[in-house]
Amino acid sequence: MIRWIIIYFWDSLTKKRRKPHGVHGAEIRWAILDHPPSSVSELIHSEFDTAASFILIFDESDRGKRVYFCLRWESTTNLKGPDGEIYSAIIP
């Protein structure tokens, strides 16, 4: 699991690692940047996941760089929720 970052997400009401009731999945937006993004629009990559975790896999050349990411829920009726906080991690 070298150069992997696992993003876990959970239901904030129950504090359990699962999707909230009525949620189909989460949109994960991310980017490797030299500085913190001023808005979510700078997170140029987008993935969608229906499980309670998502794995970002990076190349060896990305080692030591900082990745920023943000999630937002999407309902079973395709309504998108607000963007969550922007978090960051160093690529191992």
Image: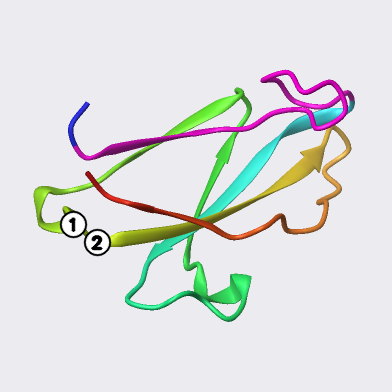
In the rendered view, tell whether residue 84 sits above or below residue 3: below
Near-viewer residue (91 or 27) = 91
- Left or right of 60 on screen, residue 33: right
Residue corresponding to mark 2: 65
Determine the secondary structure under disc 2.
Answer: loop
Residue corresponding to mark 1: 62
Determine the secondary structure under disc 1.
Answer: helix
Measuring from the top left, give residue 15's x and y in whole percent: 77, 23
- Which residue is found at the position 10% from the left and 57% from the top? 61
User: Which residue, as the protein is rendered here, is positioned at the far left?
Assistant: 60
Near-viewer residue (47 or 92) = 92
In the rendered view, tell whether residue 52 sits above or below residue 55: above
Please say whether residue 15 is one of the residues in the magenta stretch.
yes
**Residue interval drawn in magenta:** 3-21
Do the CB atoms of the residues marked 1 and 2 lie less than 8 Å apart? yes
Q: How many marks?
A: 2
